[in-house]
């Protein structure tokens, strides 16, 4: 069995996927703070 | 008279060249047609694959993916061997996905990572069974629960396994409502499944929706450039949708591009399943069979569910009971089936529980997680000097 390859792939794969998604979580939270949702003002009828 | 006999001979050549392997494959192709049409299991894919199997195994027809110069051979070479078809599918997929639940509650993205753990454990199992590195990676990616990603990776590393891997990936996606519930019930108590999560559709600004595909695309591709074709097209499709100014392109991406690509992809894969290759049996390497590929794929998806629920249980403890562990099961890429299963199981335990919004967020996180996991695998393979097939 190619144990070294398998363990490297498993450890690095899980870790990098987790770290990347965590970074994305932080970025999304930051974007939500920078650009919060605002209700569009109702359009006035002419 | 000789001319008549020659003509008659040419007319019966199809029958005289017919082998038992081809007959078995035609029965198999008919079975796939039955599953797609009568049972409605992934008909978009199983019907073209089934018919492709039949066409590809008719003797002297020149319709197999390996018949040089044939119509399907041209599709196979230009769409599968170049990895064009799965990449095109990702434009359609991106244009169909609404990331709003994820953007409103980004912490659920972490379940998208747990939902990929099965991929990596199955990789170890496949290596233990004697599959080569390339084959093990291709089989384990079934755990991504994501057909186009599985096809993309397998067409790079183990084309012989492409039919089995693609059928397994798409079949298990549709079988998620059967595979996941028993695991959910086995790993959680009724009290845990009954947890009501705070419900309220938080709204996200259009700027964030537009920025997300751009920022996520840049970040993920910088980390794992080998996954750029998948992640890039997924995020392009989503940007088209969220931009709000490209309705025509969104319609084409969701409709024509996705449909035409699915048709040609299925047909090409089906026509590559030749009896002479697919029905090989080697007693010394009995595990090296399509059945084992299917079995390992099932293990991968089950382990994804286990890992997601275990993370959900951990999050329940950390948040002091605010997270329902079932949400973790939606961290797979089977969208939106996993989210629906979570909602159904949650409601069975507690009719006042509405988990769908949170589960959809985790499920879209699983979409990103599966592509990321594949990209990381490709990057590590490249780093180890294991390149794709030429």
Image: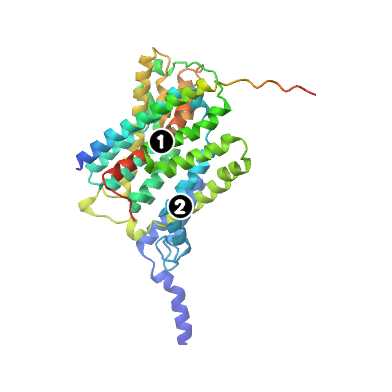
In terms of secondary structure, where does tag 2 sit?
helix
Residue at the disc numbered 2: B49
Q: Residue placed at 62% from the left, 40% from the top?
A: B247
- Residue name at image x 56 percent, y 28 percent: B207
- Crowding at label 1, few (<14), some or many (≥20) Cα neighbours within 10 Å? many
Q: Look at mark 1 in the image and give the residue it sits on.
A: B220
A11 vs B129, nearest the viewer: A11
Chain ID at mark 1: B
Q: Is residue B196 left or right of residue B377?
A: right
x, y percentage for residue B353?
Answer: 49, 18
> In front: B142, or B189?
B142
Q: Nearer the viewer, residue B288 or B111?
A: B111
Callout in the foreground (2, 1): 1
Residue B151, placed above or below residue B179: below
Q: Please report whichever mark, 2 or 1, sits nearer to the chain's N-terminal start.
A: 2
Percent across and percent down for residue B131 are 25, 47
């Amino acid at each position: 069995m190619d144990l070294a390859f398998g363990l490297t792939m498993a450890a690095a794969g899980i870790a990098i996927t987790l770290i990347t998604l965590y970074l994305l979580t932080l970025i999304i939270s930051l974007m939500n703070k920078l650009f919060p949702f605002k209700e569009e003002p109702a359009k006035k009828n002419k | 008279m000789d001319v008549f006999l020659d003509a008659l001979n040419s007319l019966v050549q199809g029958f005289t060249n017919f082998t038992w392997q081809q007959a078995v494959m035609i029965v198999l192709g008919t079975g796939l047609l039955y599953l797609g049409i009568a049972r409605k299991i992934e008909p978009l894919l199983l019907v073209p694959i089934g018919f492709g199997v039949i066409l590809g195994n008719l003797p002297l027809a020149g319709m197999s993916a390996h018949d040089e110069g044939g119509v399907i051979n041209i599709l196979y070479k230009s769409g599968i061997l170049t990895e064009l078809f799965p990449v095109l599918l990702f434009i359609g997929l991106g244009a169909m996905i609404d990331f709003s639940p994820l953007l409103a509650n980004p912490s659920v993205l972490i379940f998208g990572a747990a939902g990929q753990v099965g991929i990596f454990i199955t990789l170890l199992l496949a290596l233990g069974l004697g599959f080569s590195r390339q084959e093990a990676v291709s089989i384990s990616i079934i755990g991504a629960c994501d057909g186009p990603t599985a096809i993309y990776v397998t067409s790079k590393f183990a084309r012989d396994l492409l039919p089995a891997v693609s059928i397994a990936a798409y079949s298990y996606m549709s079988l998620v409502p059967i595979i996941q519930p028993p695991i959910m019930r086995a790993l959680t108590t009724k009290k845990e499944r009954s947890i009501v999560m705070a419900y309220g559709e938080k709204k996200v600004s259009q700027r964030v929706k537009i920025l997300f595909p751009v920022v996520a695309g840049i970040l993920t591709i910088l980390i794992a450039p080998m996954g750029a074709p998948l992640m890039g097209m997924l995020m392009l499709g989503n940007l088209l949708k969220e931009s709000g100014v490209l309705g025509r392109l969104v319609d084409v991406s969701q409709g024509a591009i996705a449909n035409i690509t699915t048709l040609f992809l299925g047909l090409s894969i089906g026509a590559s399943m030749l009896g002479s290759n697919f029905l090989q049996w080697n007693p010394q390497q009995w595990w090296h069979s399509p059945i084992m590929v299917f079995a390992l794929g099932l293990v991968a998806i089950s382990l994804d569910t286990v890992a997601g629920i275990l993370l959900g249980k951990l999050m329940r403890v950390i948040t002091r009971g605010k997270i329902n562990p079932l949400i973790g099961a939606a961290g797979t890429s089977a969208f939106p089936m996993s989210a629906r299963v979570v909602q159904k199981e949650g409601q069975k335990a507690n009719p006042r529980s509405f988990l769908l919004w949170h589960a959809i967020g985790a499920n879209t996180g699983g979409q990103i997680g599966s592509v990321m996991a594949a990209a990381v695998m490709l990057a590590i393979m490249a780093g180890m000097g294991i390149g794709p097939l030429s």
